[in-house]
Image: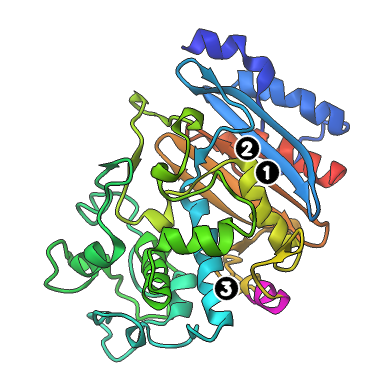
Amino acid sequence: MRTVLLALAALVPASACSVPTEIADVADSRAELEEAFRATSIPSVSAIVVNAESVVWQESYGFADVDRPADGLTFYDVASVSKLVVATAVMQLVEQGLLDLDADVNGYLPFHVVHPAHPDVPVTIHHLLTHTSGLTWPETDADVPGLYVPYPLDAAPPLGTWLPEFILPGGAHYVPTVWRASAPGEQEFYSNIGVSLAAYLVEVVAQTDFNAYVRERIFAPLQMSSTSFAYADLDMAHAARPYGRGGWAAFTRVRPYPSGDLKTTPEDFSHLLMAYLGEGAYQGRRILQPSTVRRILSVENPASGLCLIWARTLAGWYGHSGGKDGVAAYAEIQPERGVALMIVANQRHSAVYPGGRIHALVRRIAWDDG
């Protein structure tokens, strides 16, 4: 397979956090993408640059599957970039007065959630969106056994079934390490479980499945027809198969799917990025009010740059990364410049992220061409 990838090297992107000084202009940046692809083992990479109104540039390179080239219709698992959808959904309900950021989550849930070591400190929705609830990440299945068991396609248990089993003392899968020692609101600890709990709040309040809610309230108005948390909603002929440590992998779903199992194309997801650039609206379709967008992008933790799920980085960019075995993704916006980009790959590779060459080159195109 490596021989074939090298033969198709003239097709893919490259990256780095600060733009290499030897790149003279945008044309050079695009040419450098081909060389960068040749230097990686990534089967395929797709990237896009947009402004608030339209696509500025996009390319797809390499193989989406064993013998199928990637193209503009190819959809990818974007791992934790999925969390941007969760934040958007929660804040829609906050706008409507159906959720309160500072309210105890137990005012909405059908089961009672408290930090076992700090029962008098309520867990709030704000804590969940700023990773300060006290719930652990967890980074691997060994940390909280069973959480990341892969289920074929869309077969993972519903949020309302597994969440109490894992986070409530006495639950079937409960382990004390699911909670950190710090009280809610004290420290920032990135948490897939916490964000999944936020997604479940959407289910409870909206009285519908989380995926159904976001398809109706976010993806449909933004014309994201090739985006879903469920494979059943998508045409598998266009799926980018993950290429992990063991080679080509199966299509699976894990319990905390809202935190890391969204499937989308770069062009589809760019509509959400364009809505954020447009203060909550995309081509006249509004999903958030301008004040809500500003609230989401307000920095909560100056040390980390964390906002509400989004994170502010250098030069006024706001973004989120996603990564797991067989998946790499990065999405970001620069509101002052009015540009955004997304890079996805079906292999986890540092070149896609800030500090990597693909990211640097695509950001250079966004900065100069946007």
Magenta-highlighted stretch: main secondary structure?
helix
**Nearer the N terminus, badge 2 or badge 1?**
1
Specify the amino acid type for callout 3: Asn
Relative vertical location of residue 54 with respect to residue 47 in this rendering, above or below: below
Q: Residues within 10 Å of mark 2 (few under 14, many from 20)?
A: some
Q: Which is more toward the observer, 368 or 163?
A: 163
Residue 176: x, y in percent? 19, 68
Residue 17, numbered label: 1
Q: CA distance from mark 3 to mark 2?
A: 25 Å
SS at mark 3 in the image: loop
Q: In the image, which disc is placed on residue 259?
A: none
In this picture, is 195 found above or below 78? below
Question: Which residue has dot 3 on it?
Answer: 301
Q: Position of residue 306 (x, y in %)?
A: 57, 67
Q: Residues within 10 Å of mark 1 (few under 14, many from 20)?
A: some
N-term mark: 1 or 3: 1
What amino acid is found at the position of numbered circle 1 in the picture? Cys
Question: Which residue appears at 50% of the width and 45% of the height?
Answer: 78
Q: Above or below — where is 71 with respect to 196?
A: above
Would residue 51 appear left or right of 325 to someone viewing this image?
A: right
What amino acid does circle 2 point to? Gly
**In the displayed structure image, the side of residue 363 where residue 343 appears, left or right:** left
Whether tag 2 and tag 1 are in contact, CB under 8 A, the answer is: yes
Q: Secondary structure at mark 1?
A: loop
Disc 1 and disc 3 in contact, CB within 8 angstroms:
no
Give the SS element for disc 2. loop
Mark 2 lies on residue: 356
Could you tell me if residue 333 is visible in this image?
yes
In the rendering, at what x and y percent does residue 49 appear?
A: 74, 43
